[in-house]
Every structure is written in C-alpha cells, then in structure tokens.
C-alpha cells in the first residue's frame, strides 16, 4: 500500500447500484445509504452503472469490479454493499475480485432487523430469516467447509463433507426455530381471538418504513412506542386500546413493521405472524410520508407487500403524514379528499403526527367507521332471528 492510500476504515462502505432499465431506480442510492447508516456503516462513495442484464459471474462485469476495487482502496473502505440481491456465486466471485467483504441489500436489511428485534417472537423471526439466507451462502463464506471429513468416530458418516454437515446443522436449526415460532404464533393467535370475542374494531397501521407510523400511533393512544427518524425504528407489533367515543366504543390499534422496496422474501415469510395483525384488521391505516418526493412509488411497494400477505382486500384509509414538513406552497387545499389506489377510490386525510394537526379529524373518521362496523355486526347478529319467523 502506498503512502497516499488511506488505511482501511472499519465500517466504511462503497455503495453500488446497477440500473437495468427498470422503473424507480434509485440513481442517488439514497435509500441504500440510509440502510447502511442504520446498520452502523459509513458510506464513503457511491457508484452506479447501467447494464442490460446482470453479469453471470460478477453481476457488474470485470471492468466495473476493478473500478470498485480501486475506489475502495482510494477511500479506505472495508466493505462493498450492492443495492440489488446477489447470487451466492456472484458474491463469492466479487469478494475474490475486489478483495473485500461484499454484501447485498438483503443482507443489510437482515442485519438491521437482527439489531432492532426486541420481543421473543421478533428475534425468532429474524433468526429464521437469517438462517434461510445463510443456508444458501455456505459455499461462499467458508472455504474450509469443502474439506472431507470421514472415517470412524466422526459425525455424519464416512465421506460426508464439512459443507454437507453444516448444511444439515443449519437445516436442523431452521426446523427448531420454526417449531419455536409456531408455538409463539399460537399464543399470539389466542390473544387475537380474545380481542375478537370482545368485538373490538381492529385497526392496523401499515406503510413504508419511516413514514411516521409509530409517531402517529403514539399521538393516537398516548403510548411510548419507540419512534425515530430512521429506517425500521419499529419491528415488533404493538397493540393498544383506542377509545373512540359513545356509539363507536373501544377499538384495538396495532403498529406494525414498516415495508420497504424489495423486502427479502424470507423476511416476509418469517414476519407473517407480525404482519398477521394487518391481515386480521377491519381497517388499514396506510401511512404515507407526504413530504417524500418518492411517496407514490413507496405506496406501490406497500400495496405489493399487502397483496403478498393477503391483506390487499381489507378497507384502507390513506393517512398522508408529515404535513408540517411540506412546503407552504405545496400544501393541499383540502385536508380530506379521496384518491385512486389500484382502481378504487380511497379516502385520504392529511395530518402531522408531530404537531397534531389533522389528528382530531382522523379520530372522527375512525369513530364513524367503528360505529358503522358495530351497527353492521348488530344487524348480522339479528338476521337469523328474522329468518326463524318464516
């Protein structure tokens, strides 16, 4: 290393994004940078390039891999983060070509979830997702796993390679974690049925990460759920009672994990129990960061995840949050209107969870909907009695 080359800095990362001509490419790698910072890394350089298709071996091609290596040396980076998912072979080949640890967006999100999970269920869900991810990366990570282990007195029987043994051990760990998670899910299901027996109107907050769901949750129920201006501030579902006044009674309101573009499928599967609150809701409050210029794309991503977990058919109320962060010239003329979502007209309310502007209007709308739900249930309960007369 020459005298002019900076020493490698722990946590310094080169961010790389590849534009394949798909819509919504983040040319500034803004979200990847936020993810990296949330995971405790420091982005020192960003590099984007265009390709028609991924290179089978190196994802970006050998020339670009050389450029990344030179950039990393120039800035003293210790790792490289790609905005797209890499195959195990591409990750291994890139590490050999660049000489540094290479990670992808999926790994970064998994790391953040591992750092943030607090509840027993959340930790189990993250562990399951990480094990599933790791099971495909064994070949990439440890070259010593390819050595043969066999003979009398060794585990796994003669001729079983270390990598086969480790794969089997990870498979067993996945099975154990699934069993433990299923037990926790049954307990959560029991709690949910108890709420259903009480007949509470169920509201679930959903939305893109950092849209302000937890801040709105706190403003609605005077809770102290953790809220911060960062990605994935909340992972574990929190449910509280919300009194909506005479006629509407008491509702239950749940704050769920935020969604994100290209949420790893392993996490969607692993977090089914957490997101079950959204599936079982009577109403989804789809919270949107109205001050974010990319909010239309973020809304599409939320709709995609809702469809994936089977919650796309549940009635929605759009809540355009962070009204206080919108420039005065851009403020809406009306704070309540309707907007089209997937071909359906959906009611929308503009508000600021931080200042409280518009929150009373939201409470009034929730009370109206809860009251209508109570009346509908009363009619449904009375229907068999009318049938019995005939």
Image (spheres, rainbow, N blue to C red):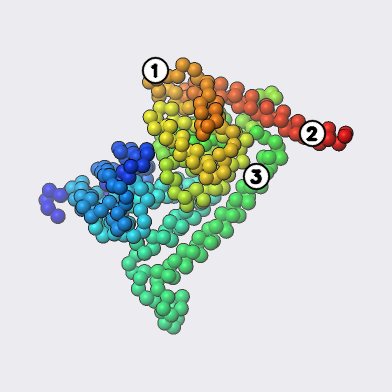
Residue ID at (61%, 30%):
242
Of the numbered discs 3 and 1, the one sitting upstream in the chain is: 3
Which of the 4 quarters of the picture holds residue 100? bottom left
Q: Which quarter of the rendering shows the N terminus?
A: bottom left
x, y (%) of residue 98?
24, 55
Residue ID at (47%, 66%):
169
Of the numbered discs 2 and 1, the one sitting upstream in the chain is: 1
Picture layout, residue 190 above or below residue 292: below
Cα–Cα span, label 3 and label 2: 28 Å
Q: Is residue 37 visible?
A: no
Kindly check if marks 3 and 1 are in contact, taking CB atoms under 8 A apart as contact: no
Pointer 3 residue: 191
Pointer 2 residue: 383
* Mark 3, secondary structure of its residue: helix
Residue ID at (88%, 34%):
390
Q: Bin the neighbour count of mark 2 within 10 Å (Cα to Cα): few under 14, some 14-19, many 20 and up.
A: few
Pointer 1 residue: 328
């Amino acid at each position: 290393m020459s005298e002019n080359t900076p020493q490698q800095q722990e946590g310094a990362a080169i961010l790389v994004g590849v534009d394949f001509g798909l819509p919504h490419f983040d040319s500034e790698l803004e979200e990847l940078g936020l993810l990296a910072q949330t995971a405790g890394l420091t982005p020192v350089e960003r590099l984007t390039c265009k390709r028609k298709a991924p290179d089978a071996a190196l994802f970006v091609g050998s020339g670009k891999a050389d450029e990344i290596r030179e950039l990393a040396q120039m800035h003293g980076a210790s790792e490289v983060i790609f905005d797209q998912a890499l195959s195990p072979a591409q990750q291994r080949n890139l590490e050999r070509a660049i000489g540094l640890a290479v990670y992808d967006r999926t790994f970064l999100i998994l790391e953040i979830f591992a750092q943030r999970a607090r509840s027993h269920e959340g930790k189990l869900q993250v562990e399951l997702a990480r094990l599933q991810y790791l099971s495909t990366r064994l070949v990439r990570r440890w070259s010593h796993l390819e050595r043969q282990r066999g003979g009398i007195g060794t585990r796994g029987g003669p001729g079983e390679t270390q990598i086969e043994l480790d794969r089997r051990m990870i498979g067993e760990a996945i099975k154990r974690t699934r069993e433990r998670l299923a037990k926790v899910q049954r307990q959560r299901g029991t709690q949910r049925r108890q709420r259903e027996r009480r007949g509470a109107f169920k509201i679930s907050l959903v939305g893109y990460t950092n849209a302000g769901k937890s801040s709105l949750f706190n403003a609605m129920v005077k809770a102290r759920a953790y809220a911060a201006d960062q990605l994935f501030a909340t992972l574990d579902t929190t449910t509280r009672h919300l009194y909506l006044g005479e006629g509407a009674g008491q509702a239950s309101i749940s704050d769920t994990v935020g969604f994100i573009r290209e949420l790893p499928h392993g996490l969607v599967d692993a977090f089914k129990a957490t997101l079950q609150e959204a599936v079982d809701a009577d109403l989804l409050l789809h919270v949107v960061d109205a001050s974010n210029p990319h909010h239309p794309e973020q809304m599409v991503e939320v709709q995609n995840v809702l469809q994936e977990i089977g919650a796309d058919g549940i009635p929605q109320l759009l809540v355009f949050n962070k009204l206080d962060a919108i420039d005065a010239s851009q403020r809406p003329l009306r704070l309540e209107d309707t907007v089209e979502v997937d071909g359906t007209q959906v009611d929308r309310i503009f508000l600021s969870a931080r200042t409280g502007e518009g929150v009373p209007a939201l409470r009034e709308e929730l009370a109206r909907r809860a009251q209508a739900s109570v009346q509908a249930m009363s009619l449904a309960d009375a229907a068999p009695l009318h049938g019995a007369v005939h």
